[in-house]
Amino acid sequence: MTPMPLIFAATCDIAGKMRGKAFPADQLEKRLKRGVGWVPTNVQITCFDGIGDSPFGSLGDLLLIPDPASEVNIAFGDAPPEHFMLGDIVTLEGEPWDFCTRQVLRDALARLHRLSGANLHSAFEHEFQLKGSGLPNQGFGRNAFENQRRMLETLMGALKEAGLSPDSIMKEYGPNQFEVVVAPADGAKSADQAVILRELTRSAALHLGEEATFAPILDPASVGNGVHIHLSFHDDDDVPLTYDENGPCGMSQLTDAFAAGVLKYMPHILALTAPSVVSYERLTPHRWSAAYNNLGFRDREASLRVCPVTAKDPASIAQQFNIEYRAADAAACPHLALAAVVHAGCQGIEDGLTAPEATQEDLSLLSADALAARGYARLPETLEAALDSFAASTTVTGWFPDQFADVYRAHKLAEIAHLADRDIDAKCAAYADTY
Ligand code: GLU
Ligand code: MG
C-alpha cells in the first residue's frame, strides 16, 4: 500500500477554527475550480463542537474553493507533510457566501480603499503558552528559551517555508508563555498568515512533544495571551499614509480619523475581536492588555497604541509608523477581527472623526464620569455585554451582510450556554483545550 498524499482545503470560521475537507493531491487542478462541498450550518459549529441556532437547518449546499496563494506544505520530521490551503466559500452559482470570513474581510478592505485610497498593511503579533508549568521565574528568560530552542527554531523555519516573514520570537513574561512576531503583509493576506501561524505553532509543538495553546487566558491570576494587530496604510504606489510629523502623536489625518472610529466603535466590535467567555478575564486593568477604549502613545495598557519607531529619517519613520489594536485574542477568526477593526476605522473616516487625546495615566483610578469627559469608557466586561453592545448598534451590524449579526450572536450564545455551569478555572481549561 502506498499512502495517498492529500490536500486539506480549509476555512477559518466564526469560531476561529480551521475546518475543511481533504482531497487527493493529484485532483488539485479540478478542485481549484470545483472545490469541496460545504454546508451552511457548519458556520454554527462552536469551538466546543456544539451547534448554535441556525437559520439554515439541514438545508443548502456550498463550495469551499481552495486558494493556492495560501498553500502550506510543510514536513515536520519524518511525518507526512502538512499540506493545506485556505479557501473561499461560495454558493453553487459561484457567488461569495455571506459568512465566508475571507470575503467579509475583503469587503471591509474594499470600503477602506474606496473611502481613502488606502491599502492596509497589517501584522498579527501572537502570544501563546505551552501546557505544563515550564521553568519558573523565566520572564523573557534565556534558560526557558534554550529549553524550547528546538521547537522555536522549527516554528520559525516552518513559518518561513509557508511564505511568512518571521521577525522575532521570545519567551514572554507569563509562565511557559512565548510570543512570535512576523512582518506585515498586504490586505487579507495577513489574516490568512495569522491562521497559518496558529496552525504551524500547534503543529511544531506537537511534533516535539509539547502542546501549544492560544487560549486568551489560562489562569485569571496571571497574564493573558493577546493578539496585537499592527496597522499601517499605503496608497496604490506604496507611498505610506500613516504618519504626519505634525499630526497628533505623529498620526496623519487618515490615521487619526481611522483611530477615532476604532476607539468609538470598540465596545461594539469587541464581541468579534475578543469573542470567548474568558477573553474578558484578560481585558482587565493592569494586565497590559486593554480595558478601556483609549488611545495610548507607546502605552501598553492602551487598547489602541501608537507604536514607537526606531528609524531616524522622516522617510523611514513614515515607512515604520503604525498603530496597534490590542483588544484582540486568538479565539477570534483573524479575518473577522480585522474586518471589524477596518470597518470601525472606515466609519471614523466617513464621519470625519478625530481621536481623543492619548492617555498617559492609570485609567482604573478615574470614575466613569471622569473617563467619559475624556471620551473614554470601560470596555464591556463579559461576552454577553459585548454581544449586546454589538447587536445594539445598527451602524455596526450594518457593516456586515444581512443575517450576519443574528447568526453570530446565536453562535456565541451556544458557546456561552455550553460553559454556563462551570467555574472560571474550568472555563479557562476548556478554552485551553480548544485553542
Ligand atoms: N500579554 C499581554 C496581553 O494580553 C500583552 C503583553 C505585551 O505588551 O506584550 O495582551
Ligand atoms: Mg507580548
Image (tube, helix red, strand yellow):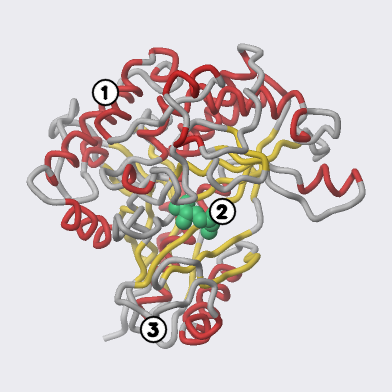
Within-10-Å neighbours for mark 1: few <14, some 14–19, many 20+: some
From the image, state whether disc 3 or disc 2 is nearer to you. 3
State the residue position of label 3.
208
Q: Residues within 10 Å of mark 3 (few under 14, many from 20)?
A: some
For the question of whether residue 274 can be seen, the reply is yes
Quarter that holds the C terminus = bottom left
Image height of 42 relative to 66, above or below: above
Identify the image quadrant of the N terminus. bottom left
Under tag 1, what secondary structure?
helix
- Residue shown at 40%/45% (left/top)? 333
Residue type beneath disc 3: Leu
As drawn, the label of residue 406 is 1
| Residue on which disc 2 sits | 69
Q: Label 2: how many residues lie within 10 Å, few (<14), some (14-19) or many (20+)? A: few
Where does the image place residue 300, in percent across and percent down from the top left? 57, 48
Q: CA distance from mark 3 to mark 2?
A: 28 Å
Looking at the image, is 150 positioned above or below residue 81? Answer: below
Residue 409, horizontal then vertical, whole percent: 25, 29
- Give percent across and percent down for residue 125: 55, 55
Q: Tell me the CA gap for discs 1 and 3.
A: 42 Å
Residue 187, quarter of the rendered image: top right
Query: Residue flagged by tag 1: what amino acid is it?
Result: Asp
- The structure residue drawn at horizontal position 48% and vertical position 68%, both measured from the top left corner, is 178
Q: Nearer the viewer, mark 1 or mark 2?
A: 1
